[in-house]
Each structure stands twice: as C-alpha cells, then as structure tokens.
Image (tube, rainbow, N blue to C red):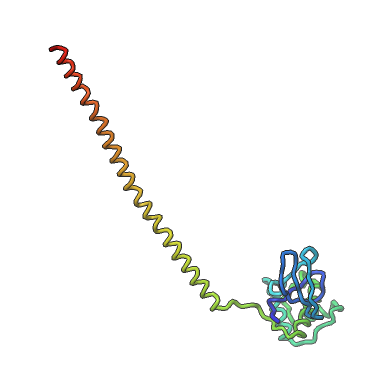
Amino acid sequence: MEYNKLVAVTGLPGLYELISSKQDGAIVRSLQDKTTKFASARIHQFSHLESIEIYTKGENVNLVEVFNAMEKDGSPLPDVKDAKALRAYFEKVYPDMDFDRVYNSDMKKIVKWFDILKSNNVEIKLTQLDESAEEPQEEASQAAAAETKAAEEPVKEKKKAAPKKAAAKKAAEASDADEKSAAPKKAPAKKKAAAKKKSE
C-alpha cells in the first residue's frame, strides 16, 4: 500500500485507500476493516495525505514531517481523549507546531492516522519524481520546439516573397499608366489630319 494513494474522507473515520475516482465521488477502501465503499462527492470531501500541511511557528510543513518526528521519537502514543496528554506529547515530539492554530481535534487525527499507518506497515514518504520519467518530457518539449520552428520558416518565406509581388504589381500599374498617357498624344494627330483634308 502506497502513502500517495491514501485519503482522509470527511464524515468517515480513519484513513482510506483511493481505488478509483469518478465525477460524482470515489471508491475507497478502509484501512481498518478493509471494506470497500462508494463515497459521494455531494456528501464527502477527500484530502490526500500527501497534500495536508501543519501549522508551525515558521512556515507550514507537510504532515509527513510530523509523522517522521513521531516515528523517530518512538514514545508511546498518548490517549486521544486526554487533551493535556496530547499537547504534552506534541510539545515533546514536534515543539515547532503552532498550538494556537493546530487544535486538539487535529492532534487527535494525527495520532489516530499515525497508528493506522503503522498497523498497516505503510511507508511514510512523499512521492518523488523519477528522473528517467522527466527525460522523455524534455525530449518531447524539444521536438515540439523544433516543429514550431519548422512551421514558422515557411511563414517567413511568404513574407519575403510578398514585396516581389508588390513590385511586380507596381510595374504593371506603371506600364498601364504609360499606355494611357501615350494614347491621348495620338488623338490630336488624327484631328490635324482631318483638318487638312477639309482645307483641301
């Protein structure tokens, strides 16, 4: 059982393994009694253990850090019904915890969840990205960049060709203008010829 597949479900006690998720909810398996059930998203909210953070006097820390501190300390877990014992335990195990913002109910959950994880022999660690999985992504991005560059080159060529067409068009317009300007010059010559005939 992997830590990154575990979720806490509001309204349901303990921890659950996420079997599959759907638009309207998720199928989960209890770590305590191993029963599988459908939890509706309309009624329940799901929190991945990996995403849960704890308030401290400095920056927030991932819940894994607190679990690791509990495991390293090795002290017997306190009675969750005894608020004073709970606080004294965490003051010893994780003194940087912000006890003004981490409530008694939160500390109860942490102790209960830790007990469930240990009883199920779950290795408490965050998922790390595999470097070999990152390499194909880099190759894919390089290939995509090459395709984009290749797609841009014909566009640049078309843009360069455009001025030639414009120059050809201007030349054609200029030749048309020359023909038009040359045509009126011939007309007066015909009139003069016609006038000569009348005088004869």
Determine whether, in the image, residue 157 is placed left or right of residue 95: left
Within the image, what quadrant is residue 41 found in?
Answer: bottom right
**Residue at (25%, 33%) from the top-left corner?**
179
x, y (%) of residue 195? Answer: 17, 15
The number of numbered badges drawn on the structure is 0
Image point (80%, 71%), residue name: 103
User: As rendered, which of 27 and 71 lies closer to the eye?
Assistant: 27
Task: Name the foreground residue: 36 vs 117.
Answer: 36
As displayed, is residue 142 above or below residue 161?
A: below
The answer to whether one can see residue 94 in this image is: yes
Q: Residue furthest left?
A: 200
Vertical order, 144 against 30 (above or below): above
Q: Is residue 198 left or right of residue 138?
A: left
**Position in image of residue 162 (x %, y %):** 35, 48
Viewport quadrant of the N terminus: bottom right
Viewer can see residue 107: no
Tell which of 37 and 76 is nearer to you. Answer: 37
- Residue 110 lies, in percent from the top left, at 77, 77
Q: What quarter of the picture does the C terminus occupy?
A: top left
Residue 27, compared with residue 170, is above or below; it is: below
User: Which residue lies at the image location 69% right of the left edge and 83% below the top edge?
Assistant: 123
